[in-house]
Image (tube, helix red, strand yellow):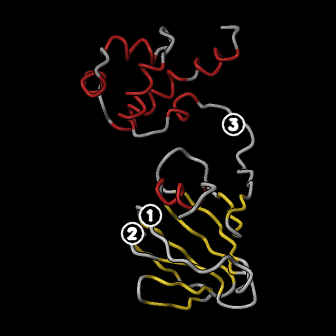
Amino acid sequence: MDHPAGGVLAGVGPRLRALRRARGTTLAALATETSLTASTLSRLENGKLRPTLEQLLPLARAHGVPLDDLVAAPPTGDPRIHLRPVRRAGLVVVPLTRRAGGVQAYKVIYPPAGRASTMSLWTHEGYEWFYVLNGHVRFVLGEQEFRLGVGEAAEFDTRIPHWIGSADGRPAELLTLFGAQGERAHLTPSRH
């Protein structure tokens, strides 16, 4: 095994054996759980068979560990998220997460009151949650109006007409969570 991956794969067998023994599971029971044969499992554990992804995935699931733990994968590089602010409708929106689909986290900076575009209520599909990091927020939801300060949070159905902005002469900074619908509504160039 002169290939760089060879060294990584050579250590898989002992890790598989240790995980199985720690669970107190037999080869036969693990074979039933993973749809691999007991013979294949034995050869994997003894290093006589080089593991494939199709074999490692069910084993990782069965043992309840990430695939990286089975292969003792080396670090894949820089784990930092490089934030790239987006400016939309007077707001600065900073993505804090970068995974495909699901709920995403953003830091949203609202300009001081009076510097933002005119207040117009708008709607879109989904739900939104925000937490005030700095400043004060004026939050209009349907017929209600709220003023939130540092440490306060709100969650709402975005199909209800709403508007969020700074409540005074200072910028307001929020931590915001929204799904794909909210992402499209907040980050596409044209808003309602």
Q: Residues within 10 Å of mark 3 (few under 14, many from 20)?
A: few
| Marks 2/3: CA–CA distance | 43 Å
The residue nearer to you, when weighing 51 against 94, is: 94
**Left or right, 135 with reference to 138:** right
Q: Position of residue 174 (x, y in %)?
A: 63, 74
**Left or right, 157 with reference to 191:** left
Q: Position of residue 18 (x, y in %)?
A: 45, 31
Q: Please report the residue visible at 74 percent of the width from the left and 54 percent of the height from the top.
A: 84
Q: Please report the residue visible at 72 percent of the width from the left and 61 percent of the height from the top.
A: 87
Q: Residues within 10 Å of mark 1 (few under 14, many from 20)?
A: some
Q: Position of residue 155 (x, y in %)?
A: 44, 75
Q: Nearer the viewer, mark 2 or mark 3?
A: 2
- Label 3 sits on what residue type? Pro
Q: Which residue is mark 3?
A: 75
| Marks 3/1: CA–CA distance | 40 Å
The image's mark for residue 159 is: 2
- Label 1 sits on what residue type? His
Q: Please report the residue visible at 47 percent of the width from the left and 9 percent of the height from the top.
A: 49
| Above or below: residue 44 compared with residue 109 | above
- Label 2 sits on what residue type? Arg
Q: Nearer the viewer, mark 3 or mark 1?
A: 1
The residue nearer to you, when weighing 104 against 56, is: 104
Q: Which residue is mark 1?
A: 124
| Above or below: residue 17 compared with residue 89 | above
